[in-house]
Amino acid sequence: MVRFQRPIELGNGARVGIVGGGPAGTLTAFFLLDVARNIGIDLRVEIFESRQFTCTGPAGCNMCGGVISESLLQMMAADGIHLPEEVVIDTIDSYMLHTDVGSVSIQAPVTEKRIASIYRGAGPHGAESQAPLPWRSFDEFLLNLAVQSGAYHIAERVTGIEWSDGRPLLITRGGERRDYDFLVGAVGINGTSVSLFEKMGRGYQPPRSVRAFIGEFYVGEKMVQRVLGHSMHVFLLELPGLKFAAMTPKGHYATFIILGDNIDKEMVQRVLAHPAVRQCLPPHWEIPVLPCQCQPRIYLGMPQRFFGHRFAMVGDCGVSRLYKDGIGAAYRTAKALAMTAVTHGVTAADLRKHYLPTCRALERDNKLGHLVFYLDELLGKSSLFRMGLLQTVQQEQEQYPVATERRLSGALWDIFTGSASYRDIVLRASHPTVLWHMIKNGWSSIGRH
Ligand SMILES: Cc1cc2nc3c(=O)[nH]c(=O)nc-3n(C[C@H](O)[C@H](O)[C@H](O)COP(=O)(O)OP(=O)(O)OC[C@H]3O[C@@H](n4cnc5c(N)ncnc54)[C@H](O)[C@@H]3O)c2cc1C
C-alpha cells in the first residue's frame, strides 16, 4: 500500500531551529525570513551558535582561506547583501601561478571580476595586539544580518537532538529543551557535532572529507604588499599527495593554505621550504614561533540521507563544492532550502523534489572537479605539460585583449577563485585551440631546454 505524507508547511508562528551560525546557518535564517515575509508568514527562527566571532584566533574562527569568489559577491549584491568595507581585508585582482618549471601572472578576466579576502573571526591569533582592529569578522557580519532580519541568536551549544511526536527537539549545554517544526543542521564538518545528527536515527552520514592546512603568517603590511601585492599566489608543485597550495595577502598577514591527501606536518614543511614558495616570502623569513595555524577538514563528497521528514543539513555538513567556494555553496544551498521549506513544505518528499536538485547539481559538478585534479596530478608529472601550460597562459595574456579568447587563463582563474563551475572550466580548457597551443608550446620549450 502506498502511503502519502500530508504536506507540512511552515505557517504563521512555525518554529525553525538552526544548529550552527556559520555562513550556511545564518544565510538559511536570512532567506527563510525573507521568503516568509514576502508571502506574509510570520516565522520564529532560532540560530544556536556559541562561537564568539569577535575573538581573534581559534575562539572566533571557522577555519577557512577566506577568499570570496566574485560570483558570490554578485549573488549577494543581487539579494541586497553588500559586504561593508571593513569586512573586506584585501581585493585580489590577479594571481601568480607558480610551478616547478616557472611562474606566470594571470590578470582578472575583466576588471569587475575581482575577489575579496576576509577573516571569518576577528583575525589571527596575536592580532589583538593591533587593537582597535581595522577589520570585522565575515561570520559576525552574517550573524548580525540574520538577527536584523528577525532571527533569534541563542549563544548556546546544542548537545542533544531528540524526536517527540515526530517533531525535532534540541537540548542545549545548559539543559534547556526546545521543540521545532523544522530542524536545520548547519554545523560544518569541523567538530564533533555531525555525530549528533548521525545518532539522531534518521540515517544521516556526513560527507567524506580530508585534512587541509591553513596558516596565517605575520609578514607586516609593507612586506605583504611588496612580495604578494594584490595577487593570490597559487603553487602547483610536483610533491606527491599535494593538490595545490595558495598564499593570499590579508593586511599584515599572508594566509597560506595547502590542500591534498591528508596534509601532515611533514608536507607543510616540504611545501614551505620549496624554492617556488620561498621566492614569494621575504628573504630570511622564518615561520613565527607561535603561528596561527590549523588543520581543518575540507569537503570531498556527498553525504547520505542529509534530509528527511522535518529536517535538512545545509552547507559543509550537507552538500558543498570540491576544494573551492565553500561559502558560495553554502549560499546556494541555504537559499534553495529556505525556498523549499517556506513555499513547498518540510516533508522528505518536498525536500527531495525541491532542495535535492540544487545539491545534485553541485555534486555532479564536483565529479568533474575530481577529474580535473586527477588529470592535473597525472599530467603535472610531465614538464612538457607544465611548460606548455605556462607558455600558453603567457601568450594568451600578451596576445588576446578580449577576455573570452583567453580560455586557459580564464579556466585557471576560475579553478582557484571558485567563480565558475568545473563543467565550464573543463569546456574552456579542453577547447581544441587551447590543446593545440599547449602541445606546441610544450614541445618547443622542451626543445629550447
Ligand atoms: C583549508 C580550507 C580553506 C578554505 N578556503 C575557503 C575559501 O577561501 N573560500 C570559501 O568560500 N570557502 C573556503 N573553505 C570552505 C569553507 O570554510 C566552508 O565551506 C564554510 O565554512 C562552510 O560553512 P558552514 O556554515 O557550512 O560551516 P562552518 O563555517 O564550519 O560553520 C559551522 C558553525 O556551526 C557551529 N556549531 C557547530 N556545532 C554546533 C553546536 N553543537 N551547537 C551550536 N553551534 C554549533 C560552529 O561553531 C560554526 O560556527 C575552506 C575550507 C578549508 C578547510
Image (cartoon, helix red, strand yellow):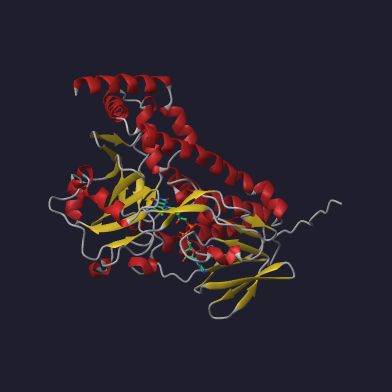
Q: In the depicted view, which residue is nearer to us: 246 or 208?
A: 208
Above or below for 311 versus 388: below
Identify the residue shown where x is 57% and y is 41%: 361
Identity of the residue drawn at 37% across and 39% down:
112
Let me know if residue 39 appears in the view.
no
Question: Who is closer to the viewer here, 275 or 169?
Answer: 275
- Tell me residue 241's x, y (percent): 36, 45
Pinpoint residue 395: horizontal percent, then vertical percent: 28, 24
Image-quarter location of ligand 1: bottom left
Q: How many marks?
A: 0
Residue 28 found in image quarter: bottom right
Give the residue at x 26% y 35%.
105
Image quarter hosting the C terminus: top left
Instruction: Judge left or right: residue 343 versus residue 147.
Output: right
Looking at the image, which residue sits at the far right?
1
- Determine whether 392 is above or below 184 in the image: above
- Percent across and percent down for residue 158 are 55, 72
> Could you tell whether 100 is left or right of 78 in the image?
left
**In the shown orientation, is residue 289 left or right of residue 316?**
left
Residue at left 35%, top 62%? 136
Q: Is residue 205 left or right of residue 61?
A: right
